[in-house]
Image (cartoon, helix red, strand yellow):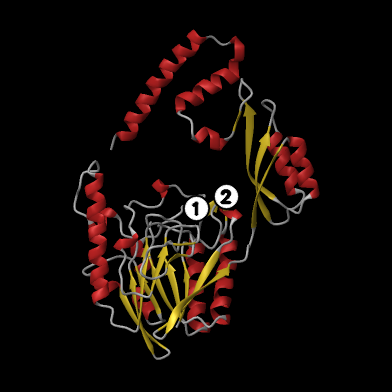
Amino acid sequence: MRLLHTSDWHIGKKIYGEDRLDEHARFLDWLLETIIDRDVDVLLVSGDVFDSSMPPARATDLYYRFLFNLYGKTRTHAVIIAGNHDSAVRLAAPGQFLKMARMHVVGGVHESAKDCVVHLDVNGQTAAFAAVPYLNEGDILPHIPLEAEIERSLRYREAMKKIYDECLSAMDADIKVFMGHYFIQGGTLGDSERLVQIGGTQPVRTDDLPGDVDYIALGHLHKPQEIKGGSCPVMYPGSPLPLSFKEAKYDKQVLLVDLGTDVACNIEEVIVPVFRKLVKVEGTPEDLTQQANFGDWMDRYVEVKVLLDGPAVGVGDEIRQAFAQMGGKVLVVESVLPTACGEILSTEDIKTRTPVEIFQDFYRYKFGESGSDTELDELLNTFNELLDISREQEMEP
């Protein structure tokens, strides 16, 4: 039995406000061709079909058009689960109709985890898929104070184990596959992800994962990777499109998985084509103009870091125009200025500094040697008062 495992499509995702639906349309066309060419029996989509709980109309149109073509042009089954970016209710709403078209969509766990198990008969072999969607702590845990972090973590893991056990008890088939959408401890975050952004759940450990299964098909992490330590292959295929300029530095992929009762699991990485290149460039205004004039920028999105000696007016517009004349589109221009002591601070540097340190850097850059320590101290006192007010307002319900 051949599976194609993919996840984290994030249809409707924008980058610096720029629509990417054309890229998603081309990806879905490519995916359909791959399913046909490689004779795929079951498509697995491990969550985050959409980028938001209320995707734009064209995003939902792309999704359902793909499912329509999958039904009409193939004999492939599909098992799809909701991720933390999806609306579980919206995704699963047409589930009864889709089931008649070989599409099985699971948005949430309701009366019993056994309801998440999908049984299929393909090529004379039976397969069971435990399609466990993204589950927030609030969905499966009684109220536990936030400060009781260790207890929350243990209770969450226990609850997940119970769900796994319920699913496993209902899986009567030759081939058994688990699906999930969460962060496994030891996983590597993609460059566009931070731990606070990957969903409101505790990390799951490999020893929490179910045994006696043939493959674990995960979603949630954008960087493709295998998690070691499981009793079977535990795989994240990653997002098929780079969701940031930093993610563009590694290949995107889907996974072809061959399973059988008398053969070992075989996994093939299939590289997803680049439908629009994301390119980062850096230099002085003169350097960037040269790069724009002599590079290949057709149909590319560009992120620019411009190194300046001091404040300059209109540089961003000039750089955008230079790249636009060569077919590229600059989405963001980041200006990098030296501090009073000559140190260069970029956006990444600023992220590691406290608000007070950033304020001090700005004061020294603005006033240099003409500034006074007394004046700076007075301004810092006022700045700290404003910070306290801001933090209090953030904590208000």
The residue under the point 40% across, 21% down is 384
1 and 2 marks in contact (CB < 8 Å)? yes
Q: Which residue is mark 1?
A: 190
Please, what secondary structure does the residue beneath circle 1 have?
A: loop
Q: CA distance from mark 1 to mark 2?
A: 9 Å
| Tag 1: amino acid | Gly
Q: Position of residue 149 (x, y in %)?
A: 26, 45
- Amino acid of disc 2: Lys
Determine which quarter of the picture holds residue 156: bottom left
Q: Residue at 58% across / 66% down in the picture?
A: 272
**Could you tell which of marks 1 and 2 lies nearer the N-terminus?**
1
Identify which residue, 3 or 64, lies in the foreground. Answer: 3
Which label number is shown at residue 246?
Answer: 2
Taking 226 as reference, is 124 above or below it? Answer: below
Residue 43: x and y in percent read 46, 75
How far across and down, in percent of the image, does residue 279 sit?
66, 50
Q: Which quadrant would the N terminus be assigned to in this image?
A: bottom left
The image quadrant that residue 264 belongs to is bottom left
Under circle 2, the secondary element is helix
